[in-house]
Amino acid sequence: MKRNLILVLVLALALVLSACGGAPAEEPAAPVAEEPAAPAEEPAAPAEEPAAEEMMEAFKVAIIMPSSITDLAFSQSMFDALLAVQAEMGGEEAMEIVYSEGMFVVDDAAAAIRDYASEGYNLVIAHGSQYGSSLQEIAPDFPETSFAWGTTLNTFSDDGITNVFAYEANSQEGGYVNGVIAASLSEAGVIGVVGPIEAGDASLYVKGFVAGAEATNPDVVVNVNWIGSFSDVALASEAASTHVAAGADVLTGTAQMVVGAIGVAEENGALWFGTQSSQTSLAPDIVVANQVYDWSVVLDEILALIHEGTYGGEAYTITLANGGLVMDYNSGYTLPDDVKALADAAVAGIIDGSIVIPVE
Amino acid sequence: MRSRLDSLLDALLPVFATFAALGVGAIMLFILRVSPVEAYGALWEGAFGSTNAMAETLVKATPLLLVGLGICIAFRASVINIGGEGQMIIGGILATQIGLTFTDWPGWLVIFAAMVAGFLGGALWGGIPGFLKAYFRVNEILSTVMMNAIAVQVMNYMLRGPMIDPAQAEKASKIPQTARLLEAFRLPRWAPTRLHAGFLIAVVLAILVYILLWRTTLGYRIRAVGQNPHAARYGGIRVRRHIVTALLLSGAFAGLAGAIQVYGVNYRMITDGSASGFTGSAGFNGIVAALFGQLHPIGTIPASIFFGALLVGANKMQRVVQIPSALITALNGLVVIFVVSSEIWRRRRQRQRLSRDETDDAPPSIAENINTSKEEGSA
Amino acid sequence: MTPELVIIGILTSGIRLATPYLYAAIGETFGQRSGVLNLGVDGQMLLGAFAGFYVAFTTGSLELGLLAAILVGAVMGLAMAFVTVNLQAEQGISGIGFYLFGLGMSELLFKMLLGTVETVKGFPSLHIPFLGDIPVLGEIFFQHNVMVYGAFLLVPVAWFVLNKTTLGLKIHSVGENPEAADSLGVSVARIRYFTIILGGILSGVAGASLSIALLNVFQQNMTSGLGFIAVALVYFGAWRPWGVLAGALLFSMVNSLQLWMQVLNIPIPTEIAIMLPYILTIVVLVITVSRVRSPSALTKPFDRGE
């Protein structure tokens, strides 16, 4: 008993001490944050920077992601867009990016969001629909900071919050196009889909895919397997094998655990359709097309608004029409002209509104 | 009575072990070309550097402490409960349902009912493995691992089906989450930080668990079953029933942890398809915290704070020096290994002191008695 | 779809899915028989999976990759043995520590050395002459890759070692009564070192069976808790290799069954289907109540008391 009491005391003391000592700690060594390859950064930058006078301080962006920046899926799509925008703006001097990846624990993410905001980041992107509640709570405390989150269209303006942007992807659109091509290329008339949980972005994509496939060939059979996890690579692969055994010669899937499924497709000579990021590098012979999310469209608009002093309130949807969704065809796979024509027609139809994809 | 120095050394052992582990971590940081000084400075800063940091540490410690209390009870009865993740989830679901259903009840009543619901939910999810162990000899490691996976699917099903936020249900992209709890139903917070009343609840419960284990007949019996089931049975204690009780209580505390996460921190449930998205792995980390606290409910309080600080500080460190979060995970693993290994010195010195050691205080060795009762149920 | 096709499909993929569980669970069986519970299997698997993948990816040699997985598994086993045997650490907790370490370290190395998801050409399917030509059975059992066969061959070998050799006898005695074993001149420490390192090696191989034979990719946390299921299966199998085999097959077959149920559009919520393997594993164990006792000294450190 006594020993534990002492332990309590020691820790309590530590807490008190640090409270006193830590209060004025404004942490001058504030985040020296650039992007991953940190060591290359030269401290000499300001000296040789002639524009140091006008000193447009670098625009500081922080991003919190559930998965990793190299997941070939949702998280990577945003990080790649950030890098693209950064390059456009003139590199690290103009825009500073820090990231927290693997933040699948919602309340850890909330701590990160608050921390970045209080460190003075201009824009904090919470890249996951699970982070919404946290933003709703934190954003009002930091009116000078702009926040963005997705995928959703809810900027919390109903709650009087004005500094939150929202963004989402009409993933059913590229899903539809993928479905059109898939149904045209499938000789067996059977297509397999591997998904994580039947909700959110994944569910949208799959609905679009099925609609596209069925609109192209009413007799096509689309089998869908939800494996109940975003991380179980083994089960995702086995789901793909199951589709192949059930006769599928074309496969698709969404979220980061499908990387193994692509290998299964390759081994069995089946075709693959990707979404979120380009997955061509994993199987250059059999990936036909990817729906790639290009969030830079959204980022550009958000940055422009922030520049004008508007910190939130807008919601964006990336679509085929506004170039946020890009159909990325694998140049290593020769798509027959007539199928390509069908795909282009589908894209055109979606853009002009003549094709309406049922997602309910 | 042991000397104060001895006690102090014992209590500080985990701290020294942590420093040793961080020393190894420093090498890894060095390889990543990050200054360990800066990195660990950030860790300290993130854990204790400001009022808010300390509040965050306590927020993180809360579920660890609650789960850890359950672990203390289970370990005392020589059962291993690694089902904390699943128990937290079920507790969280039931508690949330209360808040979503009884929207016209007064706040205090809903909070109270929700805590009870969480407690019962966890008790159910812990009680099943307890029952299966006592009466069907199903090993609890097996059943709790399986029950964790089942709970995740229950959560996914509920959040995308019956419990989905009505606002989401009508949208095309249905985020699998419940509606937000009404403001009146949230645990009071120490504004502007996130520190909520759940931490106080946990501390009070720690004292109650201490009383339960050492000042009540039930506690005596649970410990007796854990220490020597044969003797316990001989002494007229119903061994099976107490194994069930221990796991049931153990689960109940984890369930309560789930309820408090919802009512104190998140205000809704949301799933990313995994357990840890909701639990933050507290179901596992709570085991570690309990061990750091030498499986004593009171010792688990500072131990949870300590481990919570480590987790919170490590996240900060990741942000400041921009290292992959994977390093943090590995570092936590090292800390656990070092701390658990350092126990040998405590035991050695304890053995030297020998005799007269009050059973009251330290379990002789955590490992020692776990197995004795393993297959007791059917004998 | 003919029922025949579905049944062949379920059995074939059940066998594939069982492979990593078998390696890991058989390794764990050795450890537990000698009195050591290792909860760090999943972490060891991840490190093995990464090592195997990385070496195979950079050298182009699958054999070298497998060797790397074995080495990494052995090193992890060695560390675990030191901690649990020499330092007598609480086994369940130190296992969790090793799990976290493996989980983090494998991802860290992946990020530093590879940076992004890559693929390798894994061990090809081996069509076994004659046997592989048998209709139905050939397709189910004899057209897999070499790591799948290895996993199933491991079962009788493990059974033989554990039950028919002096080594097995020593392992048994160390797990049941280390004091007695010690007084008979069996080195408890040496036996436990052996079994824990063997367990580490087999966990590493289990990881490699995913990364260079079945899935041919590496991704962070790609095992997704598979190692914990493997530990559970040891209890299912009541510390007997054949029992472990039964458990691994049951779990995997039901898992592939649920994948098929979704493909066949059987109208139940997907979550219920996904739960099935977990529920059935418990239910089957309840029904077939095992009479086998756990090794008496399981989780107990041994101290010669010098």
Image (spheres, grey):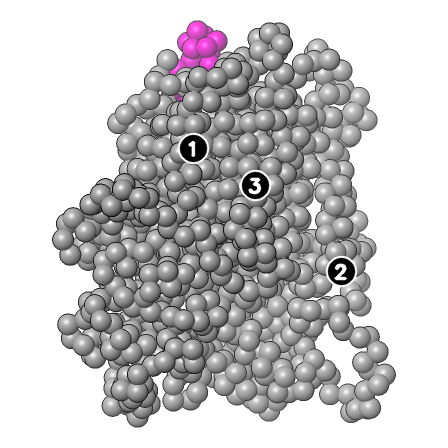
Task: Say if residue C266 shows up in the picture.
Answer: yes
Q: Quick check: is A101 in the magenta stretch?
A: no
Q: Residues within 10 Å of mark 3 (few under 14, many from 20)?
A: many
Q: In the image, what residue occupies the spot 80% across and 75% down? A: A42
Q: Position of residue B274 (x, y in %)?
A: 43, 53
Q: Chain of mark 2?
A: B
Mark 1 → mark 3, Cα distance in angstroms: 15 Å
Residue at mark 2 = B34
Mark 2 → mark 1, Cα distance in angstroms: 44 Å
For the residues bearing labels 2 and 1, Cβ distance under 8 angstroms: no
- For badge 2, the amino acid type reads Val
Q: Residues within 10 Å of mark 2 (few under 14, many from 20)?
A: some
Secondary structure type for disc 1: helix
User: Which span is picked out in magenta?
Assistant: B229-244
Residue at mark 3 = C70
Majority secondary structure in the magenta region: helix
**Quadrant of the rendered structure where residue A266 is?**
bottom left
- Between residue C301 and residue A345, name the one nearer to us: A345
Residue at mark 1 = C154
- For badge 3, the amino acid type reads Ile
- For badge 1, the amino acid type reads Leu
Q: Position of residue B29 (x, y in %)?
A: 73, 55
Q: In the image, what residue occupies the spot 56% across and 73% down? A: A79
Question: Does C240 appear above or below C110?
Answer: above
Where's the N terminus of chain C, which quadrant? Answer: bottom left
- Earlier sequence position, callout 1 versus callout 3: 3
**Quadrant of the rendered structure where residue C93 is?**
top right
Q: In the image, what residue occupies the spot 80% across and 21% down? A: B3
Q: Are marks 2 and 1 on the same chain?
A: no
Q: Are marks 3 and 2 on the same chain?
A: no
- Between residue A162 and residue B321, name the one nearer to us: B321
Q: Quick check: is B239 in the magenta stretch?
A: yes
